[in-house]
Amino acid sequence: MDIRPDDLSGPEIHALLQEHLRNMAELSPPESIHALDLDGLRQPGISFWTVWEQGRLLGCGALRELDRGHGEIKSMRTAAAHRRKGVAAHMLRHLLAEAGRRGYRRLSLETGSMAGFAPARALYARHGFVECAPFADYAEDPNSVFMTLALRAAQ
């Protein structure tokens, strides 16, 4: 699996992000959807990567800088045809390494509280994330789970 920066211009990533937004709309009420669309992902302070294998797009993920020491994971998605193959764990390890390179002291995320999000919550927990209070501009929401991970100081 090859992870590379992505400029969000290709038809494959457009299709994957449309799938992501459709799935979020199926699982969450509109007021609880925090997934970013293409324009949102192109904003300053957001870096975006895709995972590829043999010319096929497997997944994606992004980091949003909240401040110099705190980042947020955004738009983690594995294409439906490639789930349960370690794609999300591979991307998460990449995002954790990038957060370390940037000197972040904390990495946080928001995900859903519904059963459909249980695999994502389990993945994050396996990597040391713990539930926390809402951060940044988020507010308490019964449809959201907020998680965070304290990162080691940069070497």
Image (cartoon, rainbow, N blue to C red):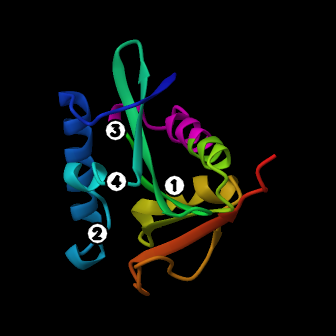
The residue labelled by disc 4 is 44
Decide which of 63, 83 is in the foreground and name it: 63
Instruction: Answer with left or right where residue 136 lies relative to residue 33.
Output: right
Depth check, mark 4 against mark 2: the one in front is 4
The image's mark for residue 33 is 2
For the point 50% across and 34% down, the residue is 87
Which residue type does callout 1 highlight? Pro
Question: Taking 136 as reference, is 116 above or below it?
Answer: above
Give the residues in magenta.
80-94
Per the picture, the main secondary structure of the magenta-coloured stretch is helix
Decide whether residue 69 is among the magenta residues: no
The image's mark for residue 31 is none
Query: Does the residue at mark 1 contact the one at mark 3 (Cβ under 8 Å)?
Result: no
The image's mark for residue 80 is 3
Task: Tell me if mark 3 has few (under 14), some (14-19) or many (20+) residues whose alpha carbon lies within 10 angstroms of its own.
Answer: few
Instruction: Answer with left or right where residue 134 lies relative to residue 54.
Output: right
Q: Earlier in the sequence, mark 3 or mark 2?
A: 2
Q: Give the image location of residue 9, x and y in percent.
A: 21, 32
Instruction: Answer with left or right where residue 97 lies relative to residue 113.
Output: right
Query: Does the residue at mark 4 contact the one at mark 2 (Cβ under 8 Å)?
Result: no
Decide which of 78, 61 is in the foreground and name it: 61
For the point 62% across and 48% down, the residue is 102
Task: Tell me if mark 2 has few (under 14), some (14-19) or many (20+) residues whose alpha carbon lies within 10 angstroms of its own.
Answer: some
Q: Quadrant of residue 64?
A: bottom left
For the point 43% across and 75% down, the residue is 144
Task: Tell me if mark 4 has few (under 14), some (14-19) or many (20+) residues whose alpha carbon lies within 10 angstroms of its own.
Answer: few
Which residue type does callout 2 highlight? Ile
Q: Earlier in the sequence, mark 4 or mark 3?
A: 4
